[in-house]
């Protein structure tokens, strides 16, 4: 048995244990990252409930993490050095197929996710591909680095929405993804960004960030138009992933407007 470390290991439905496991061994094209922060995603809760079809025990959970490179091997990515503060792309691919070689590794047929298809970041150390490691700027903390993946999702969603300066937008859902989507939309130039969220503490957080927010039950077309001074909604961002949100989005958006589904629907 090699050097060991503590890790949060999934052993089956509602069975998580803080286990002593072997530290990962670095191989060619890989890096070992000492984990500083790791977020808890909704998919981690799905795994805990025993509902994730791909997650097989025993498995170290966690795919939203940042840390410091302690070891690396291979000639790829010479820009990455031991001691670098980094964030890690949560997905990995075969890196050999036509999709990967053409820059579309995110839809590789053999794509996987750290913490789902291979051991993840709820551990002292994690082994990852050098291709998915990104150095953090000096002005980005390691704590902020753990939510870079969230921000990338939201930047992509706002980008494909084609939102323009002066547009009005509604964000359905005030969780981490929804809050970041609202901030990205505002930074992109949206004049009105209104949020709809049923949970009080999330509504309070949205308000602290400067967003007008309604309880989901009050997010009617009439109330929204009253808040925008009659300007119709150009883009609705669905960050809720719940069946009522799917219907609500169609009721709020203007004709020829856009609905961008950022959430993952599990029950429809």
Image (cartoon, rainbow, N blue to C red):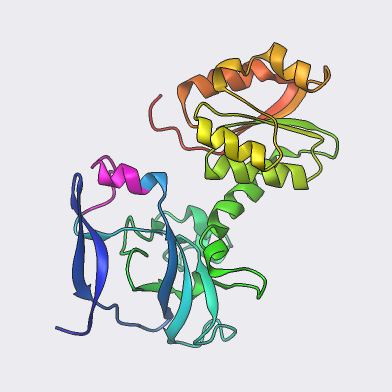
Q: Can residue 130 be seen in this view?
A: yes
Q: Judge whether 209 appears above or below 40 on screen.
A: above
Q: What stretch is highlighted in magenta?
A: 44-56
Looking at the image, residue 258 sits to the left or right of residue 1; the answer is right
Q: Which residue corresponds to the image point at 83% horizontal and 19% vertical from the top-left?
A: 229
Within the magenta stretch, is there residue 45?
yes
Q: Give whichever of 95, 200 is nearer the camera.
A: 200
Residue 160 on image: x %, y %: 69, 42
Residue 254 on image: x %, y %: 74, 19
Q: Which residue corresponds to the image point at 33% horizontal and 44% vertical from the top-left?
A: 45
Q: Judge whether 106 appears above or below 51 on screen.
A: below
Q: Give whichever of 55, 3 is nearer the camera.
A: 3
Q: Judge whether 54 appears above or below 104 on screen.
A: above
Within the magenta stretch, is there residue 49?
yes
Instruction: Point out the image quarter for the C terminus.
Output: top left
Counting every numbered tag in the picture gives: 0
Q: Which residue corresponds to the image point at 26% horizontal and 46% vertical from the top-left?
A: 48
Looking at the image, residue 76 sits to the left or right of residue 19; the answer is right
Q: Give whichever of 166, 36 is nearer the camera.
A: 36
Q: Which residue corresponds to the image point at 46% horizontal and 27% vertical from the top-left?
A: 242
Helix, strand or loop for the magenta stretch, by majority: loop
Q: Is residue 159 visible?
A: no
Instruction: Point out the image quarter for the N terminus.
Output: bottom left
Residue 62 on image: x %, y %: 37, 58
Quadrant assignment, res 23: bottom left
Residue 146 on image: x %, y %: 51, 62
């Amino acid at each position: 048995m090699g050097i060991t470390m503590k890790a949060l290991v999934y052993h089956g439905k509602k069975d998580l244990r803080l286990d002593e496991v072997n530290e990962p061994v670095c191989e060619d094209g890989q890096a070992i990252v000492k984990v500083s922060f790791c977020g808890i995603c909704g998919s981690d809760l799905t795994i805990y409930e025993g509902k994730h079809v791909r997650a097989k025990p025993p498995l170290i959970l966690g795919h939203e993490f940042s840390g410091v490179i302690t070891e690396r091997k291979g000639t790829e990515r010479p820009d990455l050095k031991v001691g670098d503060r980094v964030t890690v792309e949560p997905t990995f691919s075969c890196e050999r197929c036509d999709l990967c070689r053409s820059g579309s590794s995110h839809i590789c047929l053999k794509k996987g996710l750290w913490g789902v298809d291979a051991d993840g970041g709820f551990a002292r150390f994690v082994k990852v591909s050098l291709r998915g490691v990104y150095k953090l700027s000096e002005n980005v903390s390691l704590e902020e680095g753990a939510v870079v993946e969230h921000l990338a999702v939201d930047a992509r969603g706002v980008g494909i929405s084609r939102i323009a300066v002066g547009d009005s937008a509604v964000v359905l859902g005030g969780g981490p993804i929804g809050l970041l989507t609202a901030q990205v939309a505002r930074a992109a130039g949206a004049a009105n960004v209104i949020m709809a969220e049923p949970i009080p503490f999330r509504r309070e957080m949205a308000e602290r960030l400067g967003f007008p927010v309604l309880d989901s039950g009050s997010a009617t077309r009439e109330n929204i138009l009253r808040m925008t001074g009659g300007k119709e909604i150009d883009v609705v961002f669905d960050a809720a992933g719940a069946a009522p949100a799917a219907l609500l989005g169609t009721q709020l958006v203007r004709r020829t407007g856009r609905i961008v589904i950022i959430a993952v629907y599990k029950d429809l």
